[in-house]
Image: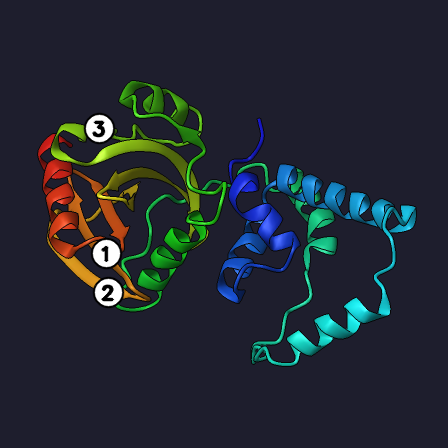
Amino acid sequence: MRCELANSLLQGYFDSELNPPRAAEFERHLLHCSECATELVDLDLLSGRLQLARIYAPAPASLRREVRANLSHVAVSSAASKPLLWHWLAAAAALLLFAVAGWRLNLNLRSNDYQGEFAEEIVEAHMTSLHPGNITGIASNDAQVVKGWFEGKTRFAVPVHDFSRQGFELQGARVDLVEGRIIPALVYTHDGHLINVFIWPTRERDTAPREGFRQGFQWVDWRQDKMEFCAVSDTDPADLEQLRQLIHSNA
């Protein structure tokens, strides 16, 4: 079975499009995922073959001058691009899978304050999902179909509901990587805004909603019946709270 993270993060990592925290998360994932490691090796081999094949025409000097002139006006990012580590991680991951046969993933996320690093991770995962082709691993507004898609991908039953009658239409779902953990995300739309609802099990007691705002996105988090939910969107906070109440009453 193909790793779901290969759909959302692998190509961006290969092309050095992920920011440093997301790239570091994916590199840690590579240590335990032979599928992603193998696909990266295949991408590198394909890239090398295409370069050797030279199936392109050299750009004329006039075009090169025009491109360079345009690029001179673009501000250079201060963050130096970090060399990809996957060339050695790919081989290490395959060996580590057999060496660490008893390794298990701890699904309980640490209880960091959402105003800190975890809020940044949640919002970053939401922003990454907005890139073309990343928003859903399965596109469906049928809650039962989405539940069935999660089988074998998570270690717990994901509560899935469609709230189309209330203005929040289920679009589908995917699995995502947050703080090194693979967790599911449900995708809704409301008045043209996409909403991601991240869900994972927790041992903590139920809590009242906590809200925050980062990088232009609103989030609301709450715990209920040994599950933690975090909804993220650029929609109005009142709309996000309405969706929270709908999920809370149907969970």
Colour scheme:
rainbow
Within-10-Å neighbours for mark 1: few <14, some 14–19, many 20+: many
Q: Nearer the viewer, residue 109 or 40?
A: 40
Horizontal side of 233 relative to 20 (left or right) equals left
Nearest to N terminus: mark 3 or mark 1: 3
Q: SS of the residue at dot 3? A: loop
- Alpha carbon separation for disc pair 1 and 2: 6 Å
Query: Residue 77, position in %: x, y?
Result: 57, 77
Mark 2 sits on what residue? Answer: 213
Name the kind of residue labelled 1 in the image.
Answer: Trp
Query: Residue 113, position in %: x, y?
Result: 25, 65
Residue at 24% across, 30% down = 159
Mark 1 sits on what residue? Answer: 219
Name the kind of residue labelled 2 in the image.
Answer: Phe
Nearest to N terminus: mark 3 or mark 2: 3
Contact (Cβ within 8 Å) of mark 1 with mark 2 = yes
Nearest to N terminus: mark 1 or mark 2: 2
Contact (Cβ within 8 Å) of mark 3 with mark 2 = no
Horizontal side of 112 relative to 152 (left or right) equals left
